[in-house]
Image (cartoon, rainbow, N blue to C red):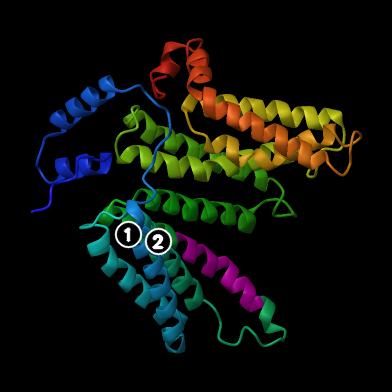
């Protein structure tokens, strides 16, 4: 008989609690014991895959779902999408519920939700839409107002259903994405302004802040980052970060690259503010989402020194900054948190 493994992951511990092998109290005691034996290392861990077999199954699943879509195309888009949803759900019953494969579950959650949204959108698509006549504009308006809105709502509902059944963390973020896209599209459709995209960045920022608040809700429930709640918060932060960063930097830069030193300095200042938030809540996604804007701002400072190498110089400097942050992240974070009020310290991960 083969010897049991001598290394156990956090997922193994969660599975043991779920299957009744040990209690949640015993699991927490074991976590505390192991934490006391080794130095605390802040890696912002999340479960992307469990071994290369998970990668292998995910690749096989992508190939299978793609092939099924191709084969069933003759039945119509709606039928093909429904078949993809059924296959994704069937695979999830084994590889998600029984094998607990993380990456494969991500594939199934995305495929299930996107297929549901696509099926509803195609159901509203007129068969003669490709005919170039006066009726095309009216048909497009019909699809835009009802098809896209219904498709996004269905995608959100499908992701929510997938989360209810399989408890895959990314499904919560996927549902939030479709719901946010539906609200954004509703603004475009019913905007009181002549230009429907006027004020759209305000809506996007509000949606980003809402997603960030929802992510913090899950983070507060798991300040030690040891349970499924932390993974849910990770994906929500990844969704919220660009929605917050884009409107802010778009306003600061007047819609384009920095035009003068004031705009470039404002971009750097805003980035530092977002970086402080990222350090305090211990989520690096906020910094990553705004990196492109920072590169453009820093490159502007070196434009006169070397127009050809300005971007290269900014890449080197920002790369060094990120590496330094990776080394001293915990130290910087501890120094920041010490100066925060207790109400804030109580809702963020301990330093």
Residue 190, horizontal then vertical, whole percent = 62, 55
What segment is highlighted magenta in the picture?
138-154
Q: Is residue 230 left or right of residue 295?
A: left
Residue 201 image point, x, y percent? 66, 44
Q: Does the stretch in magenta take in 140?
A: yes
Secondary element under disc 2, as helix, strand or loop, is helix
Residue at point 36%, 23% (across, down):
40
Expressed as whole percent of the image width and height from the top left, the position of residue 288 reads 59, 39
70, 161: nearer the viewer: 70
Q: In front of the other: label 2 or label 1?
A: 1
Q: Position of residue 178 (x, y in %)?
A: 48, 56
- For disc 1, the neighbor class at 10 Å (few under 14, some 14 to 19, many from 20) is few
**Which quadrant holds the C terminus?**
top left
Asked whether the residues under the numbered discs 2 and 1 touch, taking CB atoms below 8 Å apart as contact, a structural biologist would say no
Real-space Cα separation, disc 2 to disc 1, in angstroms: 14 Å
For disc 2, the marked residue is 107
Instruction: Name the disc covering residue 332, or none.
Output: none
**Label 2 or label 1, whichever comes before in sequence order:** 1
How many callouts does the rendering have? 2
The residue under label 1 is: 53
Can residue 78 be spotted in the picture?
Answer: no
């Amino acid at each position: 008989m083969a010897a049991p493994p001598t290394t156990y992951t956090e997922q193994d511990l969660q599975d043991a609690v779920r299957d009744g092998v040990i209690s949640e109290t015993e699991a927490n005691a074991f976590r505390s014991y192991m934490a006391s034996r080794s130095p605390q290392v802040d890696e912002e861990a999340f479960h992307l895959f469990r071994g290369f077999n998970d990668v292998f199954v995910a690749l096989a699943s992508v190939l299978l779902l793609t092939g099924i879509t191709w084969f069933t195309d003759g039945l119509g888009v709606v039928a093909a999408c429904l078949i993809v949803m059924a296959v994704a759900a069937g695979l999830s019953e084994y590889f998600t519920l029984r094998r607990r494969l993380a990456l494969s579950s991500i594939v199934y959650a995305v495929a299930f939700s996107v297929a549901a949204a696509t099926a509803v959108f195609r159901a509203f698509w007129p068969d003669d839409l490709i005919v170039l006549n006066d009726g095309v504009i009216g048909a497009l308006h019909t699809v835009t107002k009802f098809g896209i809105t219904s498709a996004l709502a269905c995608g959100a509902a499908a992701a929510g259903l997938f989360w209810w059944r399989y408890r895959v963390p990314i499904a919560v973020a996927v549902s939030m994405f479709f719901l946010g896209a539906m609200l954004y599209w509703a603004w475009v459709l019913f905007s009181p302004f002549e230009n429907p995209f006027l004020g759209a960045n305000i809506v996007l920022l509000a949606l980003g802040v809402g997603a960030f608040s929802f992510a913090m809700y899950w983070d507060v429930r798991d300040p030690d980052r040891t349970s499924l709640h932390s993974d849910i918060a990770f994906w929500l932060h990844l969704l919220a970060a660009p929605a917050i960063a884009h409107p802010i930097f778009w306003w600061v830069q007047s819609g384009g690259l920095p035009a003068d030193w004031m705009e470039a300095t404002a971009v750097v200042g805003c980035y530092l503010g977002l970086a402080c938030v990222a350090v305090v809540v211990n989520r690096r996604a906020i910094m990553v989402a705004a990196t492109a804007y920072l590169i453009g701002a820093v490159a502007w400072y070196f434009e006169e020194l070397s127009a050809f190498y300005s971007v290269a110089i900014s890449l080197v400097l920002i790369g060094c900054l990120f590496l330094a942050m990776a080394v001293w992240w915990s130290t910087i974070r501890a120094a920041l948190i010490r100066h925060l009020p207790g109400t804030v310290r109580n809702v963020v991960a301990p330093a």
